[in-house]
Amino acid sequence: MNLKNTREVYYYKDYYLKFFTKLNKAAKEKCNWTIQLVSTLERVPSKYFKYITGSSGLYEIRVEYNSDIYRIFCFFDQGNLIILLNAFQKKTEKTPHKEITLAEKLKSEYYLEK
C-alpha cells in the first residue's frame, strides 16, 4: 500500500524517541501505525488525534494498545508539519498537568531555537 503523506512529522530533539525506545515491540508498532494514520489521513478521527483544550495549540496523538493508553504531544508548524514533543503512558482519567506543562515548554523552546 502506497500512502501519500498529508502531513510531515518531525521529532523535536529526542523527547519522544526516549519514550519510544522503552516500549515493547507491539506497542512501538501501534505508535508507528497511529503516527502514520495522522500523517496520511485528510481528516483524522478524534479517537487518534485531538486538540488539547486550553492549550496554546497543542494536540495529542492517542494510542491504545491492549489495556495501555499512550499520549504523544505535538503541534503544527508551517501548515502541515507536525512537531512531536514528549509522550507518556496514561494511567489516570485526566491528563497530568505536568505533562501538558512540559509540552508547552518544549513548544516554546522549539520556536526560540527556530
Image: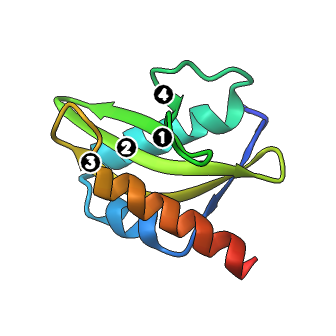
Q: Residue at x 31, y 42 (%)?
A: 70
Residue 71 disc label: 2
- Distance from Cα at disc 4 to Cα at disc 1: 8 Å
Q: Residue furthest front?
A: 54
Q: Residue at x 62, y 45 (%)?
A: 57
* Towards the viewer: 41 or 59: 59
Q: Residue at x 62, y 23 (%)?
A: 44
* Secondary structure beneath label 2: strand
Callout in the foreground (4, 3) = 3
Query: Does label 2 or label 3 sit earlier along the sequence?
Result: 2
Q: Amino acid at mark 4?
A: Tyr
Query: Does label 1 or label 3 sit earlier along the sequence?
Result: 1
Query: Does label 4 or label 3 sit earlier along the sequence?
Result: 4
Q: Which residue is mark 4?
A: 48
Residue 60 disc label: 1
Residue 95 disc label: none
Residue 1 at least partly seen: no
Q: Quadrant of residue 90?
A: top left
* Labels 1 & 3 near each other (Cβ < 8 A): no
Residue 52 locus on image (x, y percent): 49, 36
Residue 20 at least partly seen: yes
Crowding around mark 3 (Cα neighbors within 10 Å: few <14, some 14 to 19, many 20+) is few
In screen coordinates, is 6 left or right of 75?
A: right
* Labels 4 & 1 near each other (Cβ < 8 A): no
Q: Residue furthest right?
A: 78
Q: Amino acid at mark 1?
A: Glu
Callout in the foreground (2, 3) = 3
